[in-house]
Image (cartoon, helix red, strand yellow):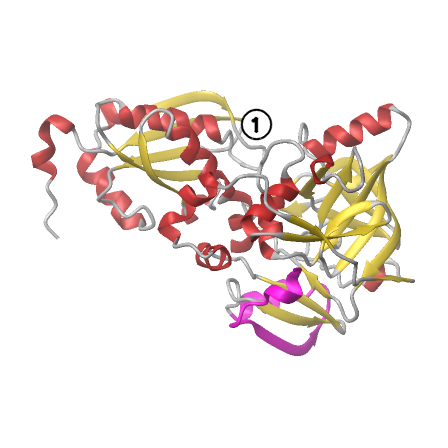
Amino acid sequence: MGIRGSIPPDVVICKDELKHDEVTGFVKENGYEKTPLILNVEGKKVAMNFISTREMLCNYLGVKKEELAAYLASIGYDGPIRIREAKLKKRNWSLYNLPILKYYPKDGGRYITAGVVIARWGRVEDANSYNACIHRMMLIDKNKLVARLVKPRHTYLLWKKAIERGEDLPIAIAIGVHPLFLFAAATRVPEGKEFGYAASLMKGLDMNIIEDMLVPEAEIVLIGRITKELADEGPFVDITATYDIVRKQPVIEIDSIYAMDDPIYYSITPASSEHQVLMGIPYEAEIYKSVSKVCNVKNVAMSPGGLHYFHAVVQIEKHSEGDGKNAILAAFAAHHSLKHVVVVDEDIDIYSSEDVEYAIATRFQADKDLVIIPNARGSSLDPSSNNGLTAKWGIDATKELSRRENFERVV
C-alpha cells in the first residue's frame, strides 16, 4: 500500500492551482502546517502532512502516544514482505513533468524531499540486500538531481565503493510511499533491514520489482544512477529553519520514470512539523533502549521546543540515587545530536513543557543535579555548534529518595 491507500479521513483537498514556489506560503497563510493536504500544483496532485504530528503517527501504528517509544523499541526487522505485480507504467517524462517544489526564496532550487533512495548490493528479490533512506535531492536538469549524501551513512558508503570500482551506483527513488514506510526509511536500523522494519511497522509490506530493483508500492518510481560527477547542492532550509551550506555533492542521472495514472506526488516541507516527526521521533526508541540498560525507563519524548531532535525528556522509575545521571549519559550515547536531556519521575507528564518545568523548579539543584559535557560531537545542523562540536547538558529532575515525602504533590 502506497500513499493512495493511506490518505487520512480529515485530509483537506485544495483545488485552486498553485505554482511550485507558492506552496509553503499558502500553507502558512492558511494555518495548514499540521493539516493533511492534497494540493493542486500546476495541475498535478501534491500531498503533504500525513504524518505531521505524534498523534498521526500513532494512528497509523494503532498505539497510544504514551506507548509509542516502548512500542517502537520492541519492533523487529522481519515483517512479512509480499512481491506484487507493479501497477505503475513507464512514462515518457522528464523530471520537469513532476511537481517538484521550491520551498523558500533562497533555496538553491527545486527539491525532492520525500524521495526514498533505494540501493541494492545483492540478489534482486532478497529484501536484506537493500538500503532505503530519505535524501534531499535538488533538481538541476531534466534528468539530473544533486543529492545530499551524509558521511558515513549507508548510501554514501555504497556510492563511495561503487565509484572506487569505476562504476555508478544504481538506485531507485520511490515517491508517494505509505507514511509508515517513509518513517521506516527515516529510522536508523541495522544494515539491510529497512524493508523488514517497514514490514513490521505495517504488519506486512507489498513490493514491486521494477528494472531489477525491489521497491515499495509508490505513486512514482525513478530509476537512475548516482554518478561520480559533483555539483553544488544548496542552500537548503533544514530542520532548524536555518539555511544549510552549499556543498559539492553527487549527481544522480535518471534513466526512466514510472508512475501511476494521475499520480499523487508527496512532499515534506523543510523545517515543518512533519520533517521533525520523521527525523526526530525514531530516536525515542533508541534512547528508550539505551536507558533501559542502566535503569527502569518508563517513557521518552523528543520535545517540540527542541524540534523533536535536539532535546529529550526521559521518564524513569527511580530506585537508586544516580539513576537520573546514568539515564542522562545513556540518552546521549543513543543520539549523538542530542544537546539537552531532562530526566523526570513517573508522576510528570513528559508531553507537557509546564509539567517538565515544574519538575525542574521543585526537584533540581544546579550544583549537584546538572551534568555538562563540553566539546562533544553534535549536529552540523545546529548553528550554535563549532565545527560539529557542542556542549551537552542534562538535568536530573527526579525526587531525592531519602526525602521522597517532601515532594508529595497535591493536585
Residue at point 31% right, 24% down?
Answer: 325
Drawn side of residue 136 relative to residue 318, left or right: right
Q: Tell me where residue 86 appears, x and y as whole percent.
A: 79, 59
Q: Residue furthest bottom?
A: 15
Q: Tell me where residue 144 appears, x and y as whole percent.
A: 86, 48
State the image quarter where residue 206 is shown: bottom right
Mark 1 Cα shell of 10 Å, populated few (<14), some (14-19), many (≥20): some
Residue sitting nearer the eye, 399 or 390: 399
Residue hosting label 1: 388
Residue at point 67% right, 35% down?
Answer: 192
Look at the picture and state if 342 lies above or below 201. above
Look at the picture and state if 407 lies above or below 140. above
Q: Is residue 9 magenta?
A: yes
Q: Quadrant of the N terminus?
A: bottom right
> Start and end of the magenta stretch?
1-30
Residue sitting nearer the eye, 170 or 200: 200
Tell me if residue 350 can be seen: yes
Residue at point 69% right, 36% down?
Answer: 128
Residue at point 54% right, 68% down?
Answer: 8
Residue sitting nearer the eye, 397 or 314: 314
Tag 1 secondary structure: loop
Tell me if residue 23 can be seen: no
**Three-letter amino acid code at the position of disc 1:** Gly
Q: Is residue 26 magenta?
A: yes
Look at the picture and state if 262 lies above or below 308. below
Drawn side of residue 243 relative to residue 288, left or right: right
